Amino acid sequence: MIIHIKKLLGETPNDLIKRFREENKEYTNEKISFAGRLDPMASGAMILLTGEDCKRQPDFTSLKKKYKFKLIRGVITDSNDILGIPQLFPEKIDKSNFKLEPKKFTQKFPIYSSRVVKGHPLWWWAKKGRLNEIEIPSKECEIYSVHENEKQRKIVHGEVLIDIILSRIDTLPVERREGFRVDEIISSWKKLLENKNILLEITEYEISVSSGTYIRGICNSMGGTAMDIHRVAFDQY
């Protein structure tokens, strides 16, 4: 069976499957897989496959995706989203250099991702401090369409932003927090944004991209951090 379902903020794909089983007892012993991942700090459309349809994963993971996302300009993190250690962007930002437009491009996998290199996911190498021992892989991606919602563009104080960030991180289940470095991340965000003079720009976009494109990676290339990623739909399905 092919099941369309919404992943909630704070859930991992495995958490989603667990929740689905709890809410649908008839699938307790059924084989279930997901077609394509979403990060814990992302929400929205996912596809679950059950039984024999689990073999059809490639049919769905290759689909184009549509997203809506918010970008914090001027702050970058080691995970490319708010669930990472932040620092102010080290250069003065010239916004003309970060215009999103339809194009093909090469994107490196985020160092905090599940892409396996030499038997371990990239996040394992990152947490061990051993990234210098491997080559971070990349893949060809494409932006098919993009639209900035200029009415949602705004400038916010650091103290306002920290409340938003903490409320989103707080959606992570308690048992997941140590693995995601939550205490260290929260402490780093608070330290960075305790300066009440810090002003940061929030921008919102709608985008259609090829399979496997990391929206948080796009945000990082624009000199910013993904604050809110929502997968709206799968194209061509």
Image: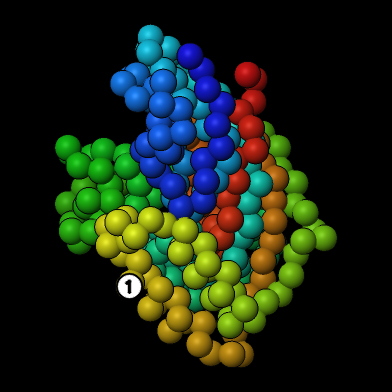
Does any portion of residue 66 appear in the rendered image? Answer: yes
- Residue 131 image position (x, y, % from top left): 23, 55
- Residue 57 image position (x, y, % from top left): 42, 19
- Residue 66 image position (x, y, % from top left): 64, 36
Q: Is residue 202 left or right of residue 108?
A: right
The residue closer to the viewer here, 4 or 58, is 4
Q: Residue at x 58, y 41 (%)?
A: 44
The residue closer to the viewer here, 2 or 42, is 2
Q: Residue at x 63, y 51 (%)?
A: 69
Q: Is residue 101 left or right of residue 192?
A: right
> Residue 28 sits in which quadrant?
top left
| Amino acid type shown at disc 1 | Glu
Q: Is residue 148 left or right of residue 162?
A: right
Look at the image and name its color scheme: rainbow
Asked if residue 220 is positioned above or below residue 85 in the image, the reply reads above
Asked if residue 68 is positioned above or below residue 236 in the image, the reply reads below
- Residue 73 image position (x, y, % from top left): 60, 67
Residue at the front extreme, as displayed: 25
Residue matched to label 1: 184
Quadrant of the image for the C terminus?
top right
The residue closer to the viewer here, 8 or 213, is 8
Q: Is residue 194 left or right of residue 131?
A: right
Q: Residue at x 59, y 90 (%)?
A: 196
Neighbour tally class for label 1: few under 14, some 14-19, many 20 plus, Cα within 10 Å = few
Q: Residue at x 60, y 46 (%)?
A: 230
> Residue 67 sits in which quadrant?
top right
Mark 1 falls on what kind of element?
helix
Residue at the top extreme, as displayed: 52
